[in-house]
Image (cartoon, rainbow, N blue to C red):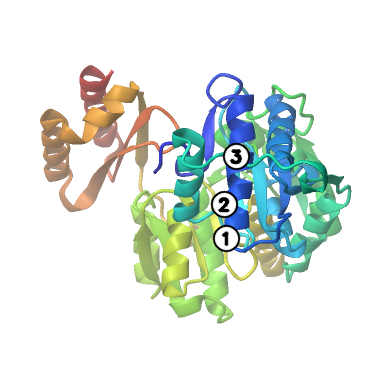
Amino acid sequence: MGRLFGTDGARGVANSELTVELATNIGRAAAMVLTESGSDKHPTVLIGKDTRLSSDMLEGALTAGLCSVGADVIIIGAVPTPAVAYLVRKYNADAGFMISASHNPFEFNGIKIFASTGYKLPDAMEDEIEAIVLDNSKPYPQPTGSGLGKVIRDENAVNDYIDYVVSTVDDRLDGMKIGIDCSNGSSSVTAEKLFTKLGAECHMLSDKPDGININDNCGSTHMENIQKFVVDNGLDLGVAFDGDADRCLAVDENGEMIDGDFIMAICAMDCASRNKLSKNAVVGTVMSNMGFTKFCKDNGLHFVAANVGDRYVLEEMLKNGYNFGGEQSGHVIFLDHATTGDGQLTAAHLLGIVNRRKAKLSDIATLMVHYPQVLVNVKVTAEGKKRYSQDEDIKAKIDSVTEQLGDDGRILVRLSGTEPLVRVMLEGLDLELITNLANETAELIREKLV
């Protein structure tokens, strides 16, 4: 994780940490690095954004920075993050920028950069951009006249993305009544049209973004809304996305949550049954539920654990030739169809499986047993995050909890890659025990690192 780019792009409070000046300079530096990497004199760059208030401001700043050093910009408006990853390849662009802070509150924003391949920018290129922006390692060029970049607004980008996702799905959704929570984010402009095209009867929730209501008690981080909505309206199931729609969680007809591990189990078994699961393997993370790893073992699937973060899941997939992986949070990567996690593509494939089997999601989800899991987030100072790995008392507590749980559970304590948090996760058969141990560990971390 670098000084500017974390595990999922540059992120911070808009106009305070992520300023107009910083966004402009990221645009300038990125265009310089792209040009040096062999692109044309005028590299072409896409810019997409989510629906938060500051996205317009940062779009303008990025556009100005890119054009000022000679890059041509295609503005595609409010779209999901995976749309940028797809469209950068479809439009043969040199890079794509996504302005979003994903599931974070509206006052935050971020900048993610995709290479021409549709994958997130390689670490080496991010490091080079950081050196230019933060260390002034190279001066920004100042072309004039025909050396400046131009701006094009593409009004059809959203439809191109929707049509592509629809084309990846083998099974239509005719006859299904589904609830969709758009988190007042990017999927507000795509989801209803996409799932209607697939044949579903769509009932929408939190699909009226106003710039400040993105992720506000809605979407995949607040599943209670879609749970109640599905039951109250007698729907077959429901899906919920986060602010930039790169993750998806679901609920069955009874309002019970189907998290990323369940979704992966259902989709992995379906792919395996149709000989579409490369090397019969699934890439998860160290946060994957113990029930999921047991499911893989019981069904002859090879489970591979990557570090937390969809970029690390993807790295493992690319390195070893796997085509399916994801996270409990709902980032699921169908590498045969997408270069990054795509919440709507995931939902479309999950719903297609349900409809093809003419079964209820609650019945299909019984293929995996979920181990109780407790997650406590501890807000710490920046200095506290630095001290975490050296604190002997915290290490001793983790060792003690590990010994106490034995083979019936585990503890995982890790630093958040995008927020000032230490995350304490415990898993085991005894919910009361792991809850108490999680709170004890969190309180110690709070005492030592705040």
Residue at (51%, 45%) from the top-left corner? 129
Q: How many marks?
A: 3
Give the residue type that dot 1 points to: Ser
Q: Are marks 1 and 2 in contact (CB under 8 Å)?
A: yes
Q: Which residue is mark 3?
A: 140
Figure quadrant of residue 350: bottom right
Image quarter in which the C terminus is found: top left
Q: Is 410 located above or below residue 36 in the figure?
A: above
Residue 92 image offset from top left, x and y in percent: 74, 63
Distance between the alpha carbons at the discs numbered 1 and 3: 16 Å
Find the distance from the CA under tag 3 to the CA under tag 2.
Answer: 11 Å
Residue 341 lies left or right of residue 352; in this view the side is left
Residue 251 shown left or right of residue 370 in the figure? right
Residue in the foreground of this view, choosing between 118 and 303: 118
> Quick one: 421 or 133, which is closer to the camera?
133
Task: State the CA–CA distance, disc 1 to disc 2.
Answer: 6 Å
Q: Which numbered disc, 1 or 3, marks the residue closer to the eye?
A: 3
Q: Quadrant of the N terminus?
A: top left
Residue behind mark 2: 33
Residue 37 badge: 1
